[in-house]
Image (cartoon, grey):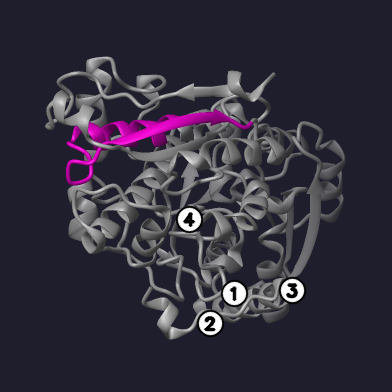
Amino acid sequence: MKLSKLVIAAAVVAAGASAVGTSAFAQAKEQFIPVLSYRTGPYGPNGAPWANGYVDYLKLVNARGGINGVKLSFEECETGYDTARSVECYERLKGKGASFVQPLSTGATFAITEKAPNDKIPVVTIGYGRSESADGSVFKWNFPIAGTYWVAADAIIQAIAKKEGGLDKLKGKKIALVYHDSPYGKEPIPLMQERSKMHGFDLQLLPVTAPGVEQKATWLQIRQARPDYVALWGWGVMNSTAIKEAQATGYPREKMYGVWWAGAEPDVKDVADGAKGYNAVTMQHGAEPQSKLVKDVLAMLHDKGQGTGPKDEVGQVLYMRGAMSAMLGVEGIRAAQDRFGKGKVMTGEQVRWGLENLNLTQPKLDALGFAGVMRPISTSCTDHMGAAWARIHTWDGKAWKFTSDWLQADEQIIKPMVKATAAKYAAEKKLTPRTPEDCQS
């Protein structure tokens, strides 16, 4: 299929949906956002709700009047979760004045990271991508805002330790990591190895070939090794397959902890009661059907026939992830406008500054509709992540329910890892870390 057939034009605001008149809209230049998504292929069932939440949030911003009157335009490009196609989409859309790009794939993030500095386009990776890119002194154009895979892995180890009665109780335990055999799946390994050395638990690494529909050999190994806990780093069909295999081999689901890409409705709904007790770490939010954001989306978009995707999906886990991802990018544009001119279209360079100077206080998040969904996020030149909070939610057979307090990843472990890995990347690429003067630019 040619790429042109995969592109879906989507720069739409229905008449009457905006506080700004249609004539003003026609005259104003729009802020362009490329949308790299995958609604097809083995990961389509999980990629589609994310894309629906992402696009709905962009539509909602327009329905609310834009960013200080500046409307958003966007174009969706189908990647099929394929790195080469993702790069093709990026190359096709970047020339339209892209504000930022969200690749929605760690493999694509690795590839686009090499291109972004020359193109001057920020790479926003909400809860995925390169964990070391939290170091903004080396990764000037990367923004893994709100959490990396090292944060997720650390929160899972903390949750397991809490269940056992403390980190000291992990000594002698066995934890198996069942992971997607890709850059994505390999991301948590360094953090888990570090925690394994610290606490004396045995870490078993079990790669699963993509897309993950064949796991019988993996679960045979689990049945033989009998680990105390299983961490699942899957995506798409791999997740439900893992839970079904756990059920078939009699592995207790309450001893399984998924990453936040293995903890949504598509992962468990087909297994239903068979998945009962299965846990996953959340990137702050979970399913949020009662949030103000969801109520606004339903009232301002879906009730008017302008929503994206099925109405009953609004507020589900991956839908919320998409909406949250769009919101963080949009707030980067808003922060840029605060410095470079309200009501103006921002360049990629200006948006980069905005993303680096986010100060999303709780009142600001509440006003955007994220009350009870998210905690404050504040980025800086050296910290492109801005928050390291997570929670655990558990499937009760019908719905996801929070089962932990807020957990904060241990920065005493993560920060030295980020610094060391970023320094290694800088040395390999012959990059000079940013100076305090550059941080002001």
Disc 3 to disc 2: CB gap under 8 Å? no
Residue that label 2 marks: 412
Residue 293 in sight in this render? yes
Mark 1 vs mark 3, foreground winner is: 3
**For the point 50% across and 57% down, which residue is it?**
120
Q: CA distance from mark 2 to mark 4?
A: 27 Å
Nearer to us in this view, 257 or 429? 429
Q: Which residues are magenta?
A: 52-79
Amino acid tagged 3: Glu
Tag of residue 122: 4
Going 33% across and 40% down the picture, which residue do you hit?
288
Q: Is residue 58 magenta?
A: yes
Q: Which mark is residue 428?
A: 3
Q: Circle 1: is it few (<14), some (14-19), or many (20+) Cα within 10 Å?
A: some
Q: Secondary structure at mark 2?
A: helix
Q: SS for tag 4?
A: loop
Q: Are marks 2 and 4 in contact (CB under 8 Å)?
A: no
Residue 171 position (above or below residue 281) = below
What residue sits right under mark 1 in the picture?
Answer: 418
Q: Amino acid at mark 4?
A: Pro
